[in-house]
Amino acid sequence: MAGRVWRSFGFMAAGTAGAARAARAIAVAVAALPGLAAPASARPVTVLAPELPPMMAADGTGREASIIAETLAACGHQAQFKVVPFGRHWIDFRGGAAVDAVTTVPDGMEMPGSRSVAYIRYQNGASVLKSSGLTVRTLADLAGKRVVTFAGAPDVLPGLRDAIPSFGDFRERADQMVHSNLLFAGRVDAVLADGLIFAEYNRQLQEKAKAAGGLPFDPGQPVQFTAIFPPTPYHLMFRDDALRADFDRCFAGLKTAGRIDAIDRAAIARYADTVGDRYLHDR
């Protein structure tokens, strides 16, 4: 019964009239499921998030947005996303931003508030041009190579900090569109990043090339993504422990109902040309 309930919704995130109606419909539907009755103190919930399409787009939609918004909706709450550049979400939350929660907090990161269950996993790996002939199974295969990754990656990706001295060149760039630019232009040999995020920026570059009449490089070059790191779990930090408890309880219900896995499968399928079956391959 639960599976039929979840398949009837295509909710992406709060912020539009359609999404709000979907949120209300989800809350009504899940009230009939064991342990998922909406709390008496249902309210809008402001969530600070980094712009990382296709996880979280500037308009508050995406894989991560869907999981958070549907989970809160299952408890009768409505997610309202405040999307900022990656890294600033942590800084602003620590600085006392007037929000209820912050997304995408890795294990071990010190952050004020109450930590949720791990609600999403990213699959970081190595992406290279197929034409390079480079096969990457471990970080050791990148010895002497030029590598770019996201800001703060040495604190998130196992073994990366120790491997940095072995690289021919190493850069951290918060703007992950830069990663794709550098790889397609031949200025780096490998990108260390989440496979879906890398694939989405490639798609955006391809669209840009069409609209602009071309780029100085070919963004359609075939790439190879390999998941050389274990999946990275992320948490929400809530200022209110009761709200965190709501989220954990309703997330467990959606996970049991199969809705979380359905969101993940849909997101991965969209970028199958890049990530193949290597994204969250332990599923």
Image (cartoon, rainbow, N blue to C red):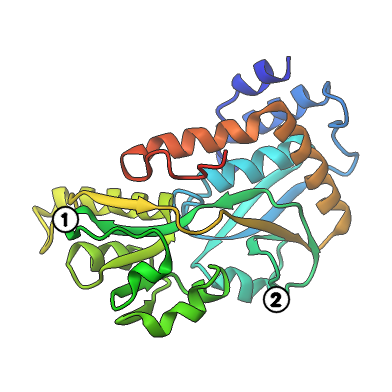
Q: Is residue 70 above or below residue 191?
A: above
In the rendered structure, the answer to whether residue 195 lies left or right of residue 102 reads left
The C terminus: image quadrant = top right
From the viewer's side, name the closer residue of 223 and 184: 223
From the viewer's side, name the closer residue of 92 and 5: 5
Q: Residues within 10 Å of mark 1 (few under 14, many from 20)?
A: few
Residue at 50% of width from left, 79% of height from top? Answer: 161
Give the amino acid type for the residue marked by disc 2 in the picture: Arg
Image quarter of residue 239: bottom right
Residue at 46% of width from left, 45% of height from top? Answer: 279
Counting from the top left corner in percent of width and height, residue 72 is at 73, 42
Q: Earlier in the sequence, mark 1 or mark 2?
A: 2
Q: Is residue 101 above or below residue 147?
A: above
Element under label 2?
A: helix
Image quarter of residue 261: top right
In the rendered structure, the answer to whether residue 46 lies left or right of residue 52 reads right
User: Mark 2 = which residue?
Assistant: 94
User: Mark 1 = which residue?
Assistant: 131
Q: Residues within 10 Å of mark 2 (few under 14, many from 20)?
A: some
Image quarter of residue 252: top right
Counting from the top left corner in percent of width and height, residue 134 is at 25, 60
Q: Residue 203 has which mark? A: none
From the viewer's side, name the closer residue of 165 and 117: 165
Residue at 45% of width from left, 48% of height from top? Answer: 54
Q: Is residue 279 above or below residue 155?
A: above
